[in-house]
Amino acid sequence: MSNPLLQVNDLVKHYPVGRTLSGRPKSVVHAVDGLSFHVDRGETLSLVGESGCGKSTVGRAILRLVDITMGQIVLDGRRIDDISQASLHPVRRRIQVVFQDPFSSLNPRMRVRDILAEPIRNFRLATGQDLERRLGELMDMVQLPRDSLGRLPHEFSGGQRQRIGIARALAAKPDLIICDEAVSALDVSVKAQVVNLLQDLQRDLGLALLFISHDLAIVEHMTQRIAVMYLGKIVEIGERRQIFGDPRHPYTVALMSALPTPDPETRRRRVTLVGDVPSPIDPPPGCRFHGRCPLAGETCRRIEPDLRQIAPGHWAACHLDDISAMTRDATV
Amino acid sequence: MTQFPSPDRTMANLAVAEALPDILPPIRRRGPVRTFIARHPTLVLGAGLLLLLVLTAVLAPWLGTLDPGALAPARRLRPPSGNNWFGTDQLGRDIYSRVIYGTRASLMVGFGVSLLSSLVGLAIGLVSGFVRWSDGLIMRAMDGLMSIPPVLLAIALMTLSRGSMGNVILAITIAEIPRVSRLIRGVVLSLRDQPYVDAAIACGTRTPMIIFRHILPNTLAPMTVQATYICASAMILEAILSFVGAGTPPSIPSWGNIMAEGRALWQVKPYIVFFPALFLSTTVLAVNLLGDGLRDALDPRMVKGV
């Protein structure tokens, strides 16, 4: 088996908060705290979790928009977390990003033509006639009319802007696109269009996607593999059917039960979590989820669980072998 | 307007709703000039007034003026009349001519200060916003600079060297630089965090191009607006400095100088002070109107299909 396209090993990102006069940080936010996963060529891995669990930081770290505190990011067998800005330049072409907010992710003063041409020129992919042809191609790919290349971003709707953002990501001919909540800000029908567009492009171009989202319905539709994050750590990772069909971490169970079912006849047991996510400045000892977990025992309060393999490709970080009590005892 | 076609439905593996037809209100056609005036009345009024003042300054010799420095002791302190439209001062100089020529001094100081302080402030603000370690240092220096009263600074400069227009501009510029650099620093800091800047970094754009392509153009609107306010306050400062005798040398007619000379007589001969004050107020008003208008007009969302 060949190397995965992207491999993240024990990624840690701490943000200092406040500084004393001597310049030492007063406290530290553990945004991402030891996280490992990989993305294969052409596959979609979803990173799901609540707001503030560190999903976006993972994306920004892979893009080298933030420097990581510890760990490794390996693209195609080569570490990219510690290389210089100069040697990073060719690597940047291979990882592109689509952001959540279609309004602030496009420079309001640049025309679509210049927005799309920017990566092409930066990576010297085309000039002159070729550039012009490529711009047309990109507009076709995202199903926008070619003659709107001369327009400014504010002339487009949210969904159209998001497609411009996707076209910009595609312009560099990347291997991996990080979709950071890329469809979360869109309304339902436009969301479906953009999701379908992403899937079609992925299939046609053989792209790998790292799909960062909190929207489980979209995640279920989009992806092959899912990683569930809680407070800077992966609590469960596996194939889609494993995560959705046989969740092995109480947090995943709670997350799944929040997903609405279209069939009104189905009565599902809803697991409602109490309390808030603990502060990432001072994460609780033991299992980070123990304060909100209905099944937490003494061990969970003291010892931090590692990811254990449950089935091939399916890993969960829970001390308990049987969490079926979670769904059985929960009130309907 | 081109209509965007609805996305191809063949891709649907999720159900996609049929795109609705675009329903746009009918466009009321007006001439481009009238549209602009209707949309930006303050901008047009401010710019019009200012243009008039610039023309006044440039065409001063041909506006029925006499030599603004010519003394005529026999005809001193005459009230406004057909010969001397704004009257004469205690040395018999024609106040109308002096006020018209004074426009030059005011505009030169106003434009000079706003241009210089914008350029320097922009550079300082960009460095401060982009080079993190320099930020604290630069901003504390700006705080220090801000704590010196501009009038005092000007007096000190005038004492150290000979009074001249250049020194007036320099003194006011130094006083105004902190305001611009703070503004630009704030804008740069907020722009740096915009997703489009992150996207540009991910697109392989290097830092100098990030600054020139993504940061600088988006600082120009707030900076232009700030420049007009600085222009207005520089004109007032120039008048104040001239009034206390630390500004434009008395040989050059400026509104502040005229008012300073008429100060002692303002209860008996109020016209000496009144006319330059009227011009000063009008100019400041024009510049402020222009600034307000620009603030609205420079919003990129107002740019219609070019």
Image (tube, rainbow, N blue to C red):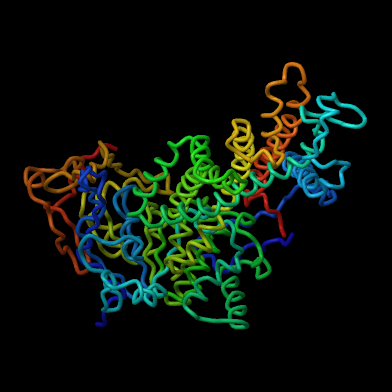
Please name whichever residue, B56 or B189, is drawn nearer the observer in this view of the structure. B56
Outermost residue, front side: B74
Outermost residue, right side: B82
Left or right: A186 in relation to A20 = right
Left or right: A190 in relation to A97 = right
Q: Quadrant of residue A241?
A: bottom left
Q: Which residue is drawn at the image coordinates 53% and 63% (left, top)?
A: B213
Q: Quadrant of residue A238?
A: bottom left
Left or right: A83 in relation to A94 = left
Image quadrant containing the N terminus of chain A: bottom left
The mark total stands at 0
> Please, is residue B101 above or below residue A183 in the view?
above
> Please, is residue A85 above or below residue A250 in the view?
below
Residue B91 position, x and y percent, is 77, 30
> Please, is residue A294 above or below residue A155 in the view?
above
Residue A76 position, x and y percent, is 30, 78
Q: Which residue is drawn at the image coordinates 59% and 62% (left, top)?
A: A110
Q: Is residue A230 visible in this depiction of the protein?
A: no
Q: Is residue A169 visible in this depiction of the protein?
A: yes
Image quadrant containing the C terminus of chain A: top left
Q: Which residue is drawn at the image coordinates 72% and 62% (left, top)?
A: B2
Please name whichever residue, A278 or B147, is drawn nearer the observer in this view of the structure. B147
Residue A85 position, x and y percent, is 34, 71
